[in-house]
Image (spheres, rainbow, N blue to C red):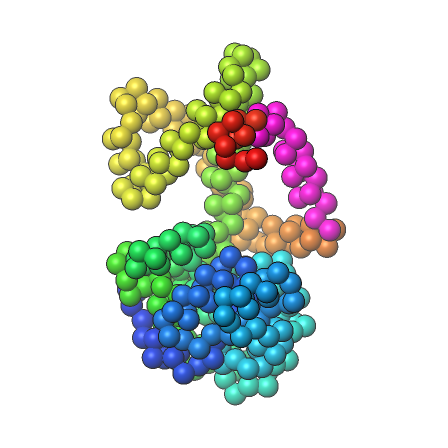
Amino acid sequence: MTQKENIFFFDGDLDLIREKRIAVIGYGNQGRVQAMILRENGLNVIVGNIKDEYWERAVEDGFQVYDIEEATRLADMALLLLPDEVAPEVYHEKMESEIKKKAHFILDFASGYNVTYGLITPPQNTDVIMVAPRMFAWGILDLHKQKKGYPVLLGVAQDVSGKAWEYAKALAKGIGAIGRPGGVALKSSFDEETLLDLLSEHVHIPLLIAAMIASFEVMTKKYRVSPEAAILELYASGELAEGAKAMAEEGLIEQLKYHSKTSQYGQLTRIQRYLRLIKDIAEKEAEDIWSGRFAREFSQENASGSIVLNRLSRIYKESDLVKAERKLYKILGRIK
């Protein structure tokens, strides 16, 4: 792959979608936040959901709520904000036939996954766009309350109107990402977003958790450190979160200025010990993602009823670290 030129967007034209009826499909964390911000920005929003607690929540929030098929029929534009593993079945069973009946439709994804791997292929009357926030829903809501924007990746998989990129920018503004201080949209693609998202979940996040578990075991089993003291040092004190915040605001290496000289020396010298090994892991995981091997593995896992996921969740939830964590968090008043 050749590295592409970066293109950033800082605003969009809400008038492009102001007269359109927008269906938010799925009223989970992202669905709720995006629907509420779109409505606050004066856009015509309805919700499509199954009749569950999320349906009731949308009603309580004052939205007109329909089953997914009806919401799609009524809409000019839909935001498909369902989990990756759920979205294909919902799309094919509840949305596709209604979309095909329309002269023109706009379908937005918050993740590149299903389009990248061909699990959803919208019809030729559809502008297929992606507006992918780079943070959790509660972070978006917190910034929205401060009248601040946030970063998103934009992609276009199909541009039948010639205005798909403009629709993507308009939607990014509609959900509060751009057109505000701190907001930026980076021109991307469905393939790129998929690789970025999955590689984070396959490399630095599990490596961080693995490092915590390994350190905990060495501290407590070999050197008899108090489990509660170990967990406080590793992450429960919040110091790690403050370091991550400084990385986000000032840079990965620049934030080291807030650490002692001992800490700076220890971190910078030990990076070299791990870098080659971790790069090899990252390259293997990236190839599995790019080739589709991971998507096939995940599809098989879903078809099995999540055997591996459920088994590993049970194992880790009964680990010595998690047991000590529960005890500590009760003492700290974080859980009952």
Write the start and end of the magenta stretch as one range. 305-326
Q: Residue furthest bottom?
A: 103
Q: Is residue 215 visible?
A: no
Give percent across and percent down for residue 224: 54, 12
Q: Residue furthest top?
A: 223
- Point 38% across, 69% down: residue: 40
Give percent across and percent down for residue 260: 28, 23
- Point 35% across, 59% down: residue: 144
Identify the image quadrant of the C terminus: top right
Give percent across and percent down for residue 204: 47, 39
Out of 122 and 238, give the one closest to the viewer.
238
Out of 61 and 154, give the one closest to the viewer.
61
On screen, 63 above or below 2? below
Give percent across and percent down for residue 72: 57, 77
Q: Is residue 201 visible?
A: yes
* Number of numbered tags placed on the structure image: 0
Q: Is residue 34 left or right of residue 101?
A: left
On screen, 193 above or below 203? below
On screen, 103 above or below 278? below
- Point 38% across, 59% down: residue: 152
318 falls in the magenta region:
yes
Q: Is residue 316 left or right of residue 15?
A: right
